Image: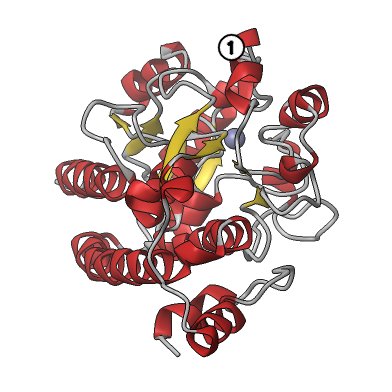
Amino acid sequence: MTAGAAAITKGRGRGRCSPRLVLLLLSILGLPLIGTSAAASMRMVATTTDLASLAEAITGDLAQVETIIPPAADPEAFEPRPSDLAKLKGASIVVRVGLGYDHWLDKLLSMQGDAAVNRGGVGYVDASVGIPLLELKGSRLDPASRDAHAHGLANPHYWLDPANAEIISGGIAEAMIRVSSETSAKIIANRGGFLSRLRTSLAGWEQLLAPHRAARLIAYHNTWPYFARRFRLNVVDVIEVKEGVAPSPARLAKLYAIMREQGIRLIVHEPFEPEEASQLLARRTGAAVVKLAPSVGSMPATTNYVALFDYNVSTLAQALAAASK
Ligand SMILES: [Zn+2]
């Protein structure tokens, strides 16, 4: 039993076929643990670049991974095109964010018709399963932010806590092993190696942001609760009351008062969001605007999941250091 095999099952209750069991059976039967050419031609489709990057990290050359939402688009305003339907044709595994973030996928999957990648199929992965969710609808937590945000069942930006990569990659690994059991040894080894490197990186990121513990920020969109919890930051409020709608003058006045009262010196903004409100607040309060990447590929340096945090953490640490001077 490898640590990787044990880790895959951690925190996930819906796996149909335990990787431990697969490994045990393969070793009893004396079957080779090396992937076949059928596995090499496997196609996986992830709705977002973040899930695709995590999938690539653990599948290596065992699967071809495609993404539906382009990295430069606002994912929550995304509407699928006919070419996205074509991507799903022949896919062995489909990975989604869930929680309403990629709600349009259900319609595409019902049109595409392959039962294996539809909800409940062996190749269907809702990556949110097993994630400790924040801002659950109906909970008593943080009613202010609930009012200010129209996400689905909970805040869906959970990939922005690197520790959640363990659960997300576990779901993808389980699906790979369900669909193609001969890939299990390689998948478990790849995932173990990736998570070990990620943990080392995470320790470095935590160290970089440690001097800014409990730093107060304003964000344009409510993207950062998982990131903020991991790195001990305090996102006090968000500018955007309703997704895609510019804030009213009354809202801006309220934010101005909060920023002045609490001495907030930094506004977190994302590349595809309208800049007027953030810039106006920054001018009025003397705060700085820092652009962070909400997803892999949404800024040039964020080429993969690890690079996403390398960029966001170092950019934010620099901006917080400059803002506190
Ligand atoms: Zn959002």
Q: Does 44 sit above or below residue 232?
A: above
Q: Tell which of 7 and 75 is nearer to you.
A: 7
**In-image side of 249 versus 4 (left or right):** right
Q: Which residue is rendered at x = 81% and y = 52% of the image?
A: 120
Q: Secondary structure at mark 1?
A: helix
Instruction: Return the x and y of residue 189 as percentages of the image width and height.
Output: 34, 71
Q: Is residue 270 visible?
A: yes
Q: Tell which of 295 and 141 is nearer to you.
A: 295
**Residue annotated with mark 1:** 83
Q: Which residue is rendered at x = 55% and y = 52% of the image?
A: 158
Q: Amino acid at mark 1?
A: Ser
Considering the image in quadrants, where does the N terminus appear? bottom left
Q: Is residue 262 visible?
A: no
Instruction: Return the x and y of residue 269 as percentages of the image width and height.
Output: 39, 29
**In-image side of 220 versus 114 (left or right):** left
Q: 10 Å neighbourhood of mark 1: few (<14), some, or many (≥20)?
A: few
Q: Does 254 sit above or below residue 237?
A: above
